[in-house]
Image: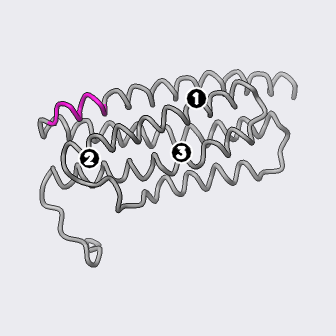
Amino acid sequence: MPRIVEGMPKITSLQEVFVDQIKDLYSAETQIIKALPKLAKAATSPDLKKGFLDHLEQTKGHAARLETICEELDFKPTGKKCLATAGLVAEGAEAIEEDATPEMKDIMLMAAAQRVEHYEMAGYTCVCALAKALDYNDALKALSITLSEETTTDKKLIALSTTAIEKANAVEV
């Protein structure tokens, strides 16, 4: 039996799905903006700390792009809470609180950050497909830029975590 959210109108068009997904991503980005400074503060690796702070500035740009898309398509980006991101942010907060060596904590922070990046990449891939189907060409261009930036951030996290894991493994042996 499908779950019906009380008080919410039935979604019946791709445009409504697009709006719903953009609002979800906007919620995700605003939650991430609040979480990144905490991750940066908890990181001990200067490269990781810098990566979190650089991504904070980039994420502010992602939110601004979403706001522009919403303005151009005449809807507000607010009104939805991304529960998945809330959970991922909670996992990041849990990693911050772990009793671990600085090196292990950094690896845990990177793992939490990668989970967020993968969620975002999935979300942006979806809204790009919707924008293309709806002929929202300006939105598609902006969303594709964000997707590319999220993919680049993921690659940077992979490189950082690979190096950190190799160093930690060499020390343990």
> Which quadrant holds the N terminus?
bottom left
Secondary structure beneath dot 2 equals: helix
Between 149 and 151, the one lying in front of the other is 149
In this rendering, would 16 be left or right of 49? left
Q: Identify the mark nearer the N-term, 1 or 3.
A: 3
Residue 129, quarter of the rendered image: top left
User: Which badge, 1 or 2, is on the more N-terminal residue?
Assistant: 1
Image quadrant where one finds the C terminus? top right
Mark seen at residue 33 = 3
**Main secondary structure found in the magenta portion:** helix
Nearer to us in this view, 168 or 52 = 52
User: Of the numbered discs in the image, which one, if any, rests on residue 70?
Assistant: 2
**Mark identifier at residue 18:** none
Give the CA separation, mark 1 to mark 3: 11 Å
In the image, is residue 27 part of the stretch drawn in magenta?
A: no
Marks 1 and 2, Cα distance to the nearest angstrom? 25 Å
What secondary structure is found at the residue carrying circle 3? helix
The answer to which of marks 3 and 2 sits earlier in the sequence is 3
Amino acid carrying label 1: it is Asp
Gap between marks 3 and 2 measured at Cα: 19 Å
Q: Residue at x 59, y 28 (%)?
A: 157
The x, y position of residue 64, in whole percent, is 38, 39
Range shown magenta: 136-143
Instruction: Specify the label residue 54 is tagged with.
Output: 1
